[in-house]
Image (cartoon, coloured by chain):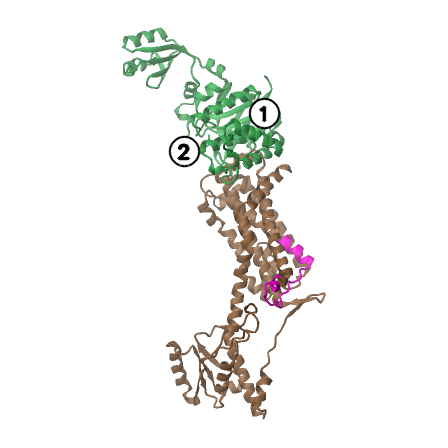
């Protein structure tokens, strides 16, 4: 697929002396699941707000589904789930959803039909209880998240933008969200989501863009990005109690460039000319009980750490990515 | 604008469905009647009911005037105190405790007064009245007492003294004392009529009350619904629903929809109120008769000219738009319920300024103060309609006031929309004036 769902060219947003986003360019092909990755305060939310024309960039252009994003009609074809979620607390669930659908140009009847469909799918409407008649503030947090999610998708958008969709979700809702994203992709929709959770991104995304301090660090397909950064990487898993035995081996910088130590699981980047076999030998000599030793491509997480590093997180900035 | 309509519909329906709306629509008139009519009713009732008796009269005239006054005060029958609702012919003739009269030599008056003062302080008498030579020559008398500020009672006393003096003069002129009473006991009811250019007149007092009610209603509606808009904006900001909505509609449309939707709620409420008031006035007499209540006299609804009606409507709409956009900006600026009342103070004060001046302006609707306040956009929505109920406002002033108000509205909406756009997504500290100006500039 060559058509682009989103084309950003050189957008910049400044707040006084502070530059939130600096000449960011990226393109998302239609039908892709695209991850916008970055630490908190990297400029993710600002970028997303600019994409949706909630705030205007100081410089640059944004094209959505082939139209400039200032064209109001194109926004009707987009679904948006903001990071900070909220609904009218005193309003009936069904009326909130109908309102959100009508704002996107959906007729009341069609909206009602789809509301029923979605409510049943997310088991908010069962034979003995219709939560649609309850007020928002009578719902549990998890249910409110579902309602918000339904509101995002009710008008069957071609492009769905989710800002930190996994934050605050319980495991069941997180799974439901993943399933829905996969389903959207199957139906040819484009999904863009921001996250700082690399695991989710790695599993879901076709392509990613990593930004830090308002600037793009890298972008491309997940496979491409990994290949590009695929040096000498080893995944190591130990049987219980072996961790202290391997520390000396792994802190040898002649051989090991860096280690992501998760206690029993290690992701190791070797120096370019180091021999993985030599490392395995030395680990065994050190008495480690190796459960797994595998030459792998680096995880997004590792690439992210390598590229952004600890300094990527700006201190004392707003909580908005 | 489809989306504008969707927003208006939500704002309108959610409010009209609320218990708050149903409650205020039903009990609003009751409450309003209670706070406007009741004090007036009590005053009038108190005035008519009051008897001035058992006071001490210090008579230094040497003509027996004090005894005449005492007799008149004591003989007053309380026919007027019977309210029309108390039924027919129930004339109260409560016996009054007679006042004490002291005939005093003029040189000893000062001492007698200090004794009387002490008696008042010791609560033996409610007060004392001094009649001296000046009473006879210049028609002046003095009263000192606890109830000196009771206007009705003082009027009664004044009337008693006047009648006593006339009586004594008539007697001096040789008229028989039996006839004097019937001669001087005459009451005049002055009914006032306001004339306009076309010569049509109405009762002045009815217009006064009508003007007061209109001005107060305008003030209340603008205040209530302006703050309602503010709370709505704050709710959208605090629940973060604003961001979802702003991904679908422009903030300007959201703001316009909110102001129009809430305004429509206000108009609905007024239509219900005025409709029921009109029905009450049209059928009230019939209903009252059916319930065995005697006819209500002198209660006519003032005729409202089409011009006044249209002006009332325009001033309400423009005044509401002006204040609600300012309130909306306040709602977008702050971050919590606690902050909002404080931040709204300046706007509230602007509005209160007009209500403070209702009375002086009603008393003198052509004064410079009245003209100025009816042209200044922030007070015009309340003061101009108020003046219009009292006098014929020159067309130029009316048009000038409307144009000024319209322009200010436009400016307020423009600035509010900019503050709103930025404020809705802001969190944290409330902006100071300098930052606010920057928001308006760069939005």
Place of residue A105 in the rendered image (x, y in percent of width and height, measured from the top left): 62, 33
Q: Which chain is green?
A: A
Residue toward you, A283 or B21:
B21
- Which chain is disc 2 placed on? A
The stretch drawn in magenta includes residue B288? yes
Q: Secondary structure at mark 1?
A: loop
Place of residue B123 in the rendered image (x, y in percent of width and height, measured from the top left): 39, 76
Region of the chain picked out in magenta, as a range: B287-315
Q: Earlier in the sequence, mark 1 or mark 2?
A: 1
The stretch drawn in magenta includes residue B88? no
- A125 versus B177 height, above or below: above
Q: Secondary structure at mark 2?
A: loop
Q: CA distance from mark 1 to mark 2?
A: 36 Å
Marks counted in the figure total 2
Asked if the residues shown at circle 1 and circle 2 are in contact, with their CB atoms under 8 angstroms apart, the answer is no
Q: For the N terminus of chain A, which image quadrant?
A: top right
Classify mark 2: residues with Cα within 10 Å, few (<14), some (14-19) or many (20+): few
Q: Nearer the viewer, mark 1 or mark 2?
A: 1
Residue A198, located in which quarter of the rendered image?
Answer: top left
Q: Which residue is mark 1?
A: A158
Place of residue A292 in the rendered image (x, y in percent of width and height, measured from the top left): 36, 11
- Which chain is disc 1 placed on? A
Question: Residue A316 bears which disc, if any?
Answer: 2
Give the drawing colour for chain B.
Answer: brown
């Amino acid at each position: 697929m060559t058509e682009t769902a989103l084309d950003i060219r050189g957008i910049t947003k400044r707040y006084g002396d502070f530059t939130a986003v600096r000449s960011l360019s990226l393109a998302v092909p239609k039908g892709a699941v695209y991850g916008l990755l970055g630490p908190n305060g990297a400029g993710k939310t600002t970028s997303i707000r600019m994409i949706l024309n909630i705030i205007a960039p100081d410089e640059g252009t944004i094209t959505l589904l082939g139209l400039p994003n200032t064209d109001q009609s194109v926004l009707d074809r987009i679904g948006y789930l903001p990071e900070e979620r909220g609904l009218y607390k005193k309003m009936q669930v069904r009326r909130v959803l109908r309102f959100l659908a009508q704002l996107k140009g959906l007729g009341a009847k069609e909206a009602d039909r789809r509301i029923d469909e979605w409510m049943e799918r997310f088991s908010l409407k069962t034979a003995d209880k219709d939560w649609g008649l309850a007020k928002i503030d009578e719902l549990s947090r998890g249910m409110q998240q579902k309602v918000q999610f339904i509101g995002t998708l009710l008008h069957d958008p071609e492009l769905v933008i989710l800002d930190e969709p996994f934050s605050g979700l319980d495991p069941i809702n997180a799974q439901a969200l993943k399933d829905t994203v996969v389903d959207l992709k199957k139906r040819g929709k484009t999904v863009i989501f921001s996250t700082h959770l690399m695991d989710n991104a790695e599993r879901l995304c076709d392509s990613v863009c990593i930004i830090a301090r308002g600037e793009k660090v890298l972008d491309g397909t997940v496979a491409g990005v990994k290949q590009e950064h695929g040096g000498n990487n080893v995944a190591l898993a130990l049987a219980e109690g072996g961790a202290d035995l391997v520390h000396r081996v792994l802190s040898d910088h002649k051989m090991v460039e860096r280690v992501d130590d998760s206690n029993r699981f290690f992701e190791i980047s070797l120096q370019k000319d180091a021999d993985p076999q030599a490392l395995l030998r030395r680990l065994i000599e050190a008495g480690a009980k190796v459960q797994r030793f595998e030459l792998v491509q680096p995880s997004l997480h590792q690439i992210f750490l390598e590229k952004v590093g600890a300094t990527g997180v700006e201190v004392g900035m707003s909580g908005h990515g | 604008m489809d989306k504008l309509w969707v927003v208006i519909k939500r704002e309108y329906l959610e409010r009209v469905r609320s218990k708050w709306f149903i409650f205020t629509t039903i009990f609003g008139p009751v409450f309003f009647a209670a706070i406007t009519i009741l004090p007036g009713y009590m005053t009038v009732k108190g005035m008519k009911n009051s008897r001035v008796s058992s006071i001490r009269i210090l008579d230094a005239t040497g003509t027996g005037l004090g005894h005449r006054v005492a007799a008149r005060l004591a003989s007053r029958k309380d026919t007027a105190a019977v309210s029309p609702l108390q039924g027919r012919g129930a004339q109260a003739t409560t016996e009054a405790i007679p006042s004490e009269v002291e005939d005093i030599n003029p040189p000893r008056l000062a001492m007698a007064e200090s004794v009387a003062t002490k008696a008042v302080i010791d609560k033996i008498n409610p007060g004392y009245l001094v009649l001296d030579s000046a009473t006879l020559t210049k028609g002046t008398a003095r009263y000192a007492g606890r109830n000196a500020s009771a206007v009705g009672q003082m009027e009664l006393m004044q009337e008693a003294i006047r009648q006593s003096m006339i009586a004594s003069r008539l007697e001096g002129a040789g008229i028989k004392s039996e006839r004097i009473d019937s001669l001087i006991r005459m009451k005049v009811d002055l009914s006032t009529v306001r004339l306009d250019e076309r010569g049509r007149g109405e009762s002045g007092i009815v217009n006064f009350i009508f003007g007061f009610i209109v001005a107060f209603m305008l003030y209340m509606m603008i205040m209530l619904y302006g703050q309602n808009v503010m709370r709505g904006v704050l709710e959208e900001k605090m629940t973060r629903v604003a961001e979802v909505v702003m991904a679908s509609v422009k903030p300007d449309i959201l703001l316009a929809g909110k102001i129009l939707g809430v305004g429509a709620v206000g108009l609905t409420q007024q239509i219900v109120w005025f409709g029921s008031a009109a029905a009450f006035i049209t059928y009230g007499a019939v209903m009252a008769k059916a319930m065995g209540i005697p006819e209500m006299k002198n209660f006519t609804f003032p005729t409202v000219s089409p011009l006044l009606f249209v002006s009332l409507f325009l001033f309400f709409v423009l005044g509401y738009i002006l204040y609600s956009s300012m309130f909306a900006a306040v709602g977008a600026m702050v971050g919590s319920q606690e902050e909002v009342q404080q931040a709204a103070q300046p706007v509230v004060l602007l509005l209160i300024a007009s209500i403070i001046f209702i009375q002086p302006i009603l008393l003198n609707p052509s004064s410079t103060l009245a003209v100025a306040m009816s042209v200044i956009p922030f007070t015009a929505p309340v003061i101009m309609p108020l003046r219009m109920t009292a006098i014929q406002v020159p067309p130029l002033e009316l048009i000038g006031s409307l144009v000024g108000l319209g322009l200010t509205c436009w400016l307020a909406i423009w600035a509010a929309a900019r503050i709103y756009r930025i404020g809705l997504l802001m969190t944290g500290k409330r902006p100071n004036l300098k930052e606010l100006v920057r928001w308006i500039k760069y939005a």
